[in-house]
Image: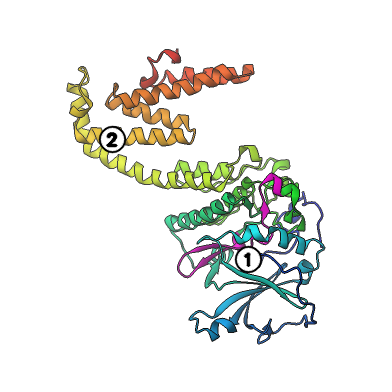
Amino acid sequence: MNTEQPPTNNSSSDATLINTETPITHIDMHLLPESAPTSKQPTSIDIGDTIKNRFVLDDLLGKGGMGSVYRALDLRKKEAGDNKPYIALKLLGDDFKHHPHALITLQREARKTQELAHPNIVTVYDFDRDGDLIYLTMEELKGKSLDELLADSETILSLKQKLDILQQIAQGLAYAHSKGIVHSDLKPANIFITDKNIVKILDFGIARAANADAYEDHFDAGKLGAVTFAYGSLEILNFEQPHTSDDIYALGIIACELIDKEHPYQRQNAQQVLIDAISPRIPKLSNPLLRKLLQQSIAVKRTHRIQNAADFLKRLKFARKGIKTTIGIAAIGIVALTANFIYWHYFAAHEVKFSDLPAAAQQEFTAHIKEAETAMSFDDLQGAVVNIDQAYKIHPSQKELIKLRDKVVSIISTKLKAANTDVDRAFYQQQLDQLKAYPAFANTNSAH
């Protein structure tokens, strides 16, 4: 088995340590019985053969370096009258099952991965052996893997459909991350889209524990080397301790490919990207929030990257909502144009109650305040400042606006006071000075 360090040349940047590029249904694993039977079993498997006197192989679905996946008839389900008697059965390949650490990995990571019961993660039924054959059974899936979907030139998806797929992937990952599990080999081939447009994340076979104690006490599944260079984070390629942000790097690349079918780094591995200082190609999107999300997801260095799928999911939902909100604000703005014109020309010189403003103006004000609050929840102070200033132009003395405005100033002022270097102090002072350009912040004491 090839376990050498990742390449740093352009010619082999898209290789894998184990060839896992063509799996149809890679799956989660759970506990292998320690006292498994040792009866002899032919290693040559054909359609029609029966595994464990129960599973009749019906069709070969796909092959990968870690094994082959079959559609199989479960005789026990058939006997019980189950209306869905077919399952997917994966037989582990010789290279994987004979690896000295493979069974240790499966046993020690089994209970963790078995907990991943989520609509966007494939359901695993069992993990067992029949003589020399080690196999896993899981729910039968009908549809296409994401890599097949991306390669299908006849399939045209709308941006909404693409973002729906991306959101479902993030939902499944967020659940895994909440359980302390990092996938570590996320890629289009490990994502399945069913005929009912439900996303299923596959191949948690080398899933790694993100918990530090678990990492120290258990064999690290990542050492098996099943990593795809084009999607592996810099830290994975450097064999560092697993972190949920490793999956975000892969997710961001998948998102770019899903949106415009191009790898943002021309399929170069993260080490090469860092060495050559390659700038990513971000899909051209009219929504700046989505572009920023993608940029922060594929940052080569972990410290610059979104840290987990829950955060990614939160930002994605906000970006998607932002499109609707912007349209809504624009519509409100058109309706309120006349009312605002009258207000500014006849009432601006006199203080009026917020409740006395035209309904359309009140709605526009409230929309800007909500956008500002959401932006602050993401630490997007610039977005907050812009929306606060827009709200200020509608009603400058509304209490909610003043509270948000003072909070922004307080945050920057606190960072200025806590700065340890001249560079940091100059940066935060510059931010305070720049606030003066906005009417809403021009007269705040801390901004002087």
Residue 364 is marked as 2
Instruction: Identify which amino acid the numbered label 2 is placed on.
Output: Glu
377 vs 145: above or below: above
Residue 153: percent from the left, percent from the top? 52, 66
Name the residue tied to disc 1.
Answer: 27
- Residue at position x 82%, y 54% in the image: 4
Residue 186 visible here: yes
Gap in Å between the C-alphas at discs 2 and 1? 49 Å
Q: What element carries label 1?
A: loop
Image-based side of 407 in relation to 277, left or right: left
- Compare residues 80 and 63 and report the one nearer the observer: 80
Q: What stretch is highlighted in magenta?
A: 188-214
The amino acid sitting under disc 1 is Ile
Task: Report if residue 359 lies within the magenta region.
Answer: no
Q: Can residue 255 be seen in this view?
A: no
Point out the tag, 2 or 1, that comes first from the N-terminus: 1
